[in-house]
Image (cartoon, helix red, strand yellow):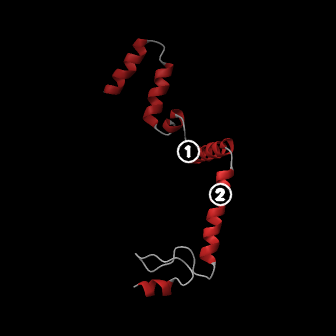
Amino acid sequence: QMQANAANAPYGVYDTYGSYCHDGIAKGQAEEIRVAQRTASYRECLKDTATKKNQEFEARKAIFAASGPSTFAEIYANMPMVNKVTTSMSSADSTASSQQYYESLQM
């Protein structure tokens, strides 16, 4: 089995649980990938705390912007029953009119 793994990934790193190469299939590709990963890790360690926190903040901001509505008003905007209740409650000028609306919903 070890020989089969080595034959399937002659220039890369083979896994004992399968016969595939993790890093590369061409000569030198696995080493290039490992060097690039170590270089990126080293450069990340050189950054100051403010830069790292700013990158985290920008990433979170981009995710929130891409994820859609973020306020309850935006979330409930497409729900007709909630819109009916909120508009009637905001236009209710007294407890009596609110009570009348509540009773009309119970019918």
Helix, strand or loop at label 1? It is loop
Identify which residue is drawn at 57% across, 44% down: 64
In percent of width and height, residue 102 lies at 36, 22
> Where residue 76 sits in the image (x, y, percent)?
48, 36
Q: Residue at x 48, y 32 (%)?
A: 83
Q: Amino acid at mark 2?
A: Tyr
> Going from the N terminus, do you reach mark 1 or mark 2 first?
2
Q: Is residue 89 above or below residue 54?
A: above
* Residue 17 placement (x, y as % from top left): 40, 75
Query: Where residue 79 sits in the image (x, y, percent)?
Result: 46, 38
Of residue 88 and residue 20, the one placed in the foreground of this image is: 20
Residue drawn at the location 68% of the way across and 49% of the way down: 47
The residue beneath circle 1 is: 68
Q: Residues within 10 Å of mark 2 (few under 14, many from 20)?
A: few
SS for callout 2: helix
Measure the C-alpha gap from mark 1 to mark 2: 35 Å
Which residue is under mark 2? Answer: 42
